[in-house]
Amino acid sequence: MRMKKIKWTIMLGTLVGLVSCGLDMPKETQSSFETMTVEKSDIELPYKFSARMKGQNDVTVTPQVSGQLMKICVSEGQQVKQGQTLFIIDQRNAQLELEAAQANLQAALAQENSAKLEYESNKNLFDKKIVSSYMLNNSENSYKQAQAAVAQARAAANRAKVNLGFCTITASVSGVIGEIPVRAGDQVSPATQLTILSGNTSMYAEISVTEAIIESMVKEGVKAADLEKNLAKLPDATFIMKNGTEYPHKGRVASLTGVVNAATGSSGIQGTVVMNFAEKGVIVIPQNAVIRLQDKTQVFKVKADSTATATDVTIEDTGNGKDFMVTSGLNSGDKIVTTGANNVTDGQKVLFPEEVKSAK
């Protein structure tokens, strides 16, 4: 038994040795990083400004009666026509008041009719000298009081009808609905502001910008002299409402002033004005090529020997979520690492001989 165990051990070792001698071990291969050669191109950069859009004649919409707000029939930024229903307040109390007023009117009319008949009867009897003038005058006064009571009851019924109508709030002018600070179910009163209706086809959005933005606009040709002509050269503006909806009509810059209005934004439709300014002959690179290290922004430039070297750059966001615009640090014809740049170290070889020709 001992001899068999030793022999088996030797044979196993020999078998392993033979298999190992005949096995081809895989060679280590290195793949190139993705790169690109930067070139100058034209691009449009979106500048965004917080603003509120207003009409030339803004109408504040408030209820005429108190009650629970049952339904909101419009949405912020919606274009409405004059007479279109905007809000509906609980009508039940108003309806009951109208019915009560109409019943009182009917009772007053019946009383008036009785007083009239009595007066006419007494007048006929007075003419025949059957009743005294006192009875005639008394019946005449009763008839006049009944007529006054009818007038009061009719006014109350009309007022109740108007109040019922106030429960349905309609647009006084055609325009655009502003911010709606109330919700269905809220208790409202004549002191409650429901919305602001910008009642004019000409809409304005007042914006405040930083000095840096002003300088970039001046660079595009906005100068003090011949201001109107230079304002006309500015790009169209788009208004993005608070809920993300884009206002369907484009706008133009109509005026420019250095005075800040503290009341700007007190009313109207809240949103963002976006203007696309053209940048010509700039270098645009993908965001995955950029490495941020504390206060530095770098890319890895590929040298002639296929090694990477960290290069400081200054960039600006293009606003498209994919690219950066390089304002310094790179020149046309430079090759940089794109995909995988965050895994590269300074001096590392990133392109290999068999793959250099096919590199981007």
Image (tube, grey):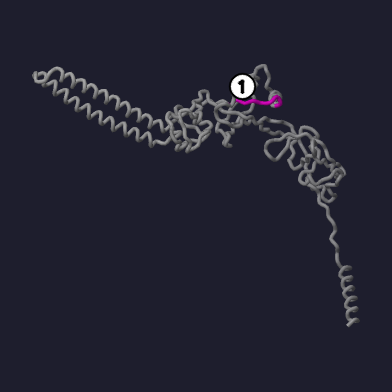
Quadrant of the rendered image containing residue 215:
top right
Can residue 220 be spotted in the picture? no
Quadrant of the rendered image containing residue 52:
top right
Q: Measuring from the top left, give residue 76's x and y in whole percent.
A: 52, 34
Magenta span has 72? no
Q: Quadrant of the C terminus?
A: top right
Q: Going 87% across and 71% down the picture, which residue do you hit?
A: 16
Q: Going 32% across and 34% down the picture, which residue do you hit?
A: 99
Q: Measuring from the top left, give residue 259's x and y in whole percent.
A: 64, 19
Q: Badge 1: how crowded within 10 Å, few (<14), some, or many (20+)?
A: few
Mark 1 residue element: loop
Quadrant of the rendered image containing residue 123:
top left
Magenta span has 211? yes
The kind of residue tagged 1 is Asn
- Magenta residues? 205-212
Residue positioned most to the bottom: 1
Which is more toward the observer, 282 or 119?
Answer: 119
Q: Measuring from the top left, give residue 193's x and y in whole percent.
A: 50, 29
Q: Going 90% across and 76% down the picture, which residue do you hit?
A: 10
Q: Which residue is mark 1?
A: 261
Can residue 80 be spotted in the picture? yes
Look at the picture and state if 255 lies above or below 166: above
